[in-house]
Amino acid sequence: MKKIAALLIILVSLNASAQSTSQQDSLALRKLYDVALLHGQSYAWLDHLSNNIGGRLSGSVSAQQAVEYTKSEMEKLGLDRVWLQPVMVPKWTRGTPEYAYVQSQGGPSTTVNILALGGSVATPDTGLRANVIEVQGIEDLARYGREQIEGKIVFYNRPMRADLIHTFEAYGGCVDQRYSGAAEAAKYGAAGVIVRSLSHKIDDYPHTGSMSYGDVPNNERIPAAAISTKDAEYLSSMLKLNKDLEFYYKMNCRNYEDVESYNVIGEIKGSERPDEYIIVGGHLDSWDVGDGAHDDGAGVVQSMEVLRLLKESGIKPKRTIRVVLFMNEENGLRGGNKYAEVAKKNKENHIFALESDSGGFTPRGFSIEARDSQYEKIQGWKPLFEPYLIHYFARGGSGADIGPLKNGSTVLAGLRPDSQRYFDHHHAATDTFDAVNKRELELGAATMASLVYLVDKYGFDDIENESEILK
Ligand SMILES: [Zn+2]
């Protein structure tokens, strides 16, 4: 009887302490959201990054200005250490604005909106004029064969699926046309490629993005451009009327030797376990059209804000918390690879990495790459987030820049904002500061800071030794 009573007392006190812990935690989260929404800094940082610096393509003057600006802003936060991590990055320039038109034999020409894809070679100085073959994807090339493709411009026109709720899935279902379309078409003797912009919206803005020639030799590389969705529909409808029409485009983009750039890093040293690292980040580079406010200025300023929020809220982390602003996500991922390489060389134990690179829209939750037990632990914190309408905790990809840290024990996560409008802006001239809502941006920062706070406080030690397969 006595034993049972003692057990009950233990259980009651355990329950009480669990309750007070969770009460402490909900107060801590409330404080983080309060500071973000009442005294936030992220929006002002984004304003400067977008409007005073602008598009930040790797190797450009503005990318270097962004490095210097974010470093100096981090230095003002009173972090324990702020530094630059050198990394060699590709340099590609767009040159003068692209020009393109569609012309039916002898008839009038209609100009269309295109953008060179990042890394593309230029057209000849006088431009490239050829017939067009429309395909719905790379898999169509083999069906048409060299006899129907040689000397023509391959027009990839598979649209993003509208029925997928997760728009990144729709993007993932089409991005091979942009990334590998030129390399594949070159194998069939194509003269060039035009790719339908990766956006649901039918408008006049082409969306650029990275592409690769794979193992296609230099002298066989063909120019590649994105065409706006509206002009893709126009070109497709014109081809139905006249398959012999001609497409003309002129681009003088150029690839240079690699140049030196930097990841920008700041950290708060852990008070109890300084050798365990938690990192939060986004990528500092962006495409050159627009000002990269959503992709990924938002992730940059939110990540900086996480460290500021922890400090302003009086939270002294047990583990070392780092903000990492990665260079060159868009056309090389050199920054992400360099960070992981140095971390490995220095034998730094990263327990958690969180990236924000899905736009500055209303946060919904996180997608998580972790073992079952780690994932369940994070899911256990879900009730703490519910007052802030954060409810999405699912397994899935985290972020490109933190991907190289994947090792089977580091937990990786990506902030998941509402994605319905993201691809209206992604890699286009419409990715601008005015498209970012201040409150949505701030809510994202507070949501990230909350997860960082919980991971720092509880860690994953208790489940560290389980031998599970990473999912
Ligand atoms: Zn991005």
Image: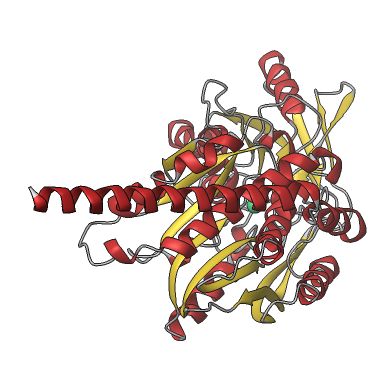
How many numbered circles are shown?
0
Picture quadrant where residue 438 is located: top right
* Residue 171 position within the rendered picture, expressed as x and y whole percent measured from the top left: 56, 37
Instruction: Give the farthest residue toward the bottom.
Output: 346
Tell me if I can see residue 436 in this picture.
Answer: no
Q: Is residue 165 left or right of residue 427?
A: left
Counting from the top left corner in percent of width and height, residue 202 is at 74, 24
Query: x and y percent of residue 412 in the render?
Result: 45, 57
Q: Residue at x 60, y 56 (%)?
A: 449
Is any atom of residue 409 visible in this view? Answer: yes
For image coordinates 73% across by 18% down, the residue present is 238
Q: Position of residue 218 (x, y in %)?
A: 61, 65
Res 358 → quadrant: top right
Of the pair 122 and 301, the residue shown nearer to us: 301
Residue drawn at x 52%, y 52% as measured from the top left: 25
Is residue 1 or residue 160 the one in the foreground? Answer: 1
Q: Is residue 221 left or right of residue 124?
A: left
**In this picture, is 73 found above or below 101?**
below
Is residue 304 depicted above or below 395 in this figure?
A: below
The residue closer to the viewer here, 16 or 378, is 16
